[in-house]
Amino acid sequence: MKRIAITAVALAGIVSLGACSKNAQDQSMEAANAVGADVSATTSNAVSDVQAATDQALNGAGAAMDNAGDAVKNKADKAGDTLKQGADKARDAAGGALKDAGNAIEKH
């Protein structure tokens, strides 16, 4: 009888330990899932932050290039206007010199 009681108590202990182990396993699984979810969320946020920073940098670079292009165009336009004015003055001066030469030839 003593043997049966010891066996029953041991069996109850084993069943109880098995249940405890299952509970511990479940809790460990839940903790692992929570850690995995946190890692996933953190990674997702980091990727979003990097993408936003990259977009901002590219937009800034694009705006700087646009501004530089506009500045070059403005300078080129001014240079073109200056050349045109110089060419107009040279043409007028050449035309006047030819007219004077023609008048001088007529007088002689």
Image (cartoon, rainbow, N blue to C red):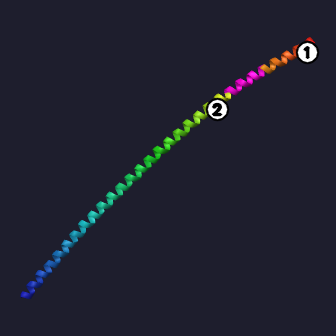
Within-10-Å neighbours for mark 2: few <14, some 14–19, many 20+: few
Quadrant location of the C terminus in the rendered image: top right
In this image, 85 relative to 23: left or right? right
Task: Determine the CA span between mark 2 and mark 1.
Answer: 43 Å
Kindly identify which residue carries mark 1: 105
Q: Would residue 108 appear left or right of 99 to someone viewing this image?
A: right
Q: Quadrant of residue 4?
A: bottom left
Residue 3 position, x and y percent, is 9, 88
- Left or right? Give the position of 107 relative to 94: right
Q: Secondary structure at mark 2?
A: helix
Residue at the image position 87 percent from the left and 13 percent from the top? 103
Up-down relation of residue 107 to residue 33 (above or below):
above
Q: 75 above or below 37?
A: above
* Between 30 and 103, the one nearer to me in the picture: 103
Name the kind of residue labelled 1 in the image: Ile
- Picture residue at 68% right of the left edge, 26% below the top: 82
Q: Are there few (<14), some (14-19), or many (20+) residues within 10 Å of tag 1?
A: few
Disc 2 marks a residue whose amino acid type is Ala
Q: Is residue 82 left or right of residue 42?
A: right
Residue 63: mark: none
- Span highlighted in magenta in the image: 81-92
Residue at the disc numbered 2: 76
**Helix, strand or loop under label 1:** helix
Front residue of 95 and 18: 95
Q: Is residue 23 above or below residue 99?
A: below
Q: What percent of the width, then of the height, locates residue 85?
A: 70, 23
